[in-house]
């Protein structure tokens, strides 16, 4: 599981990629369209899109002569579920520690 999450977190760790993903969450957009709303060049957008695609966070879709990109909610959902599982395990451990501490007080 950790090997599959590392590329996702690495991709999301960059502010520009995060901004691109947020824009793609609103609508499917081409690299040129993204360059009008994210303050980097079209070439930089293309490189960031490649990283996001390799992490499984976006995919390209041909619409006529244009290539648009869309966010892949399934990959984001998988990541959210993995984080929820980690959080639940921590909650379980903290509850166990609290029970032990309470039993020592009496």
Image (cartoon, rainbow, N blue to C red):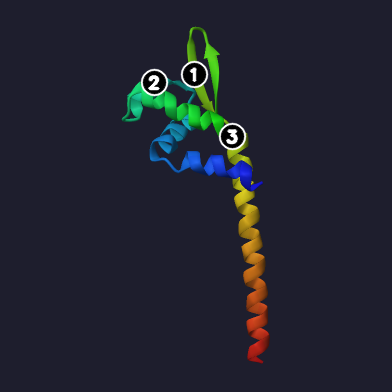
What residue is drawn where x is 42% and y is 21%? 31
Q: Could you say where residue 9 lies in the image, as x and y percent from the top left?
A: 52, 44
What residue is drawn where x is 51% and y is 7%? 64
Residue occupying the far front of the picture? 3
Q: Secondary structure at mark 3?
A: helix
Label 3 to label 2, Cα distance in Å?
21 Å
CA neighbours of label 1 inside 10 A, class few (<14), some (14 to 19), many (20+): many
Q: Earlier in the sequence, mark 3 or mark 2?
A: 2
Residue 33, which numbered label? 2
Residue 68, which numbered label? 1
Q: Earlier in the sequence, mark 3 or mark 1?
A: 1
Judged left or right of residue 106, residue 47 is: left
Residue occupying the far top of the picture? 65
In the image, 11 versus 85, the foreground residue is: 11
Q: Could you say where residue 18 lies in the image, as x and y percent from the top left?
A: 44, 38
Residue 100, which numbered label? none
In the rendered image, which quarter is residue 43 located in?
top left
Q: Could you say where residue 92 lies in the image, as x and y percent from the top left?
A: 67, 66
Q: Could you say where residue 19 lies in the image, as x and y percent from the top left?
A: 41, 36
CA neighbours of label 2 inside 10 A, class few (<14), some (14 to 19), many (20+): few
What residue is drawn where x is 63% and y is 35%? 74
In the rendered image, which quarter is residue 45 located in?
top left
The vertical placement of 75 against 47, above or below, is below
CB-based contact (under 8 Å), mark 2 and mark 1 = yes
Quarter of the figure with the C terminus:
bottom right
Residue occupying the far bottom of the picture? 106
Residue 73, which numbered label? 3
Label 2 to label 1, Cα distance in Å?
9 Å
């Amino acid at each position: 599981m950790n090997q599959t999450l590392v590329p996702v977190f690495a991709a999301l760790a960059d502010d520009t990629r995060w901004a691109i993903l947020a824009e793609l969450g609103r609508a499917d957009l081409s690299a040129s369209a993204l360059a009008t709303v994210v303050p980097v060049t079209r070439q930089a957008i293309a490189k960031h899109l490649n990283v996001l695609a390799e992490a499984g966070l976006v995919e390209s879709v041909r619409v006529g002569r244009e290539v648009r990109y869309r966010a892949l909610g399934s990959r984001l959902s998988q990541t959210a579920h993995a984080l929820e599982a980690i959080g639940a395990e921590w909650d379980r451990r903290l509850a166990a520690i609290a029970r032990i501490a309470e039993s020592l007080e009496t």
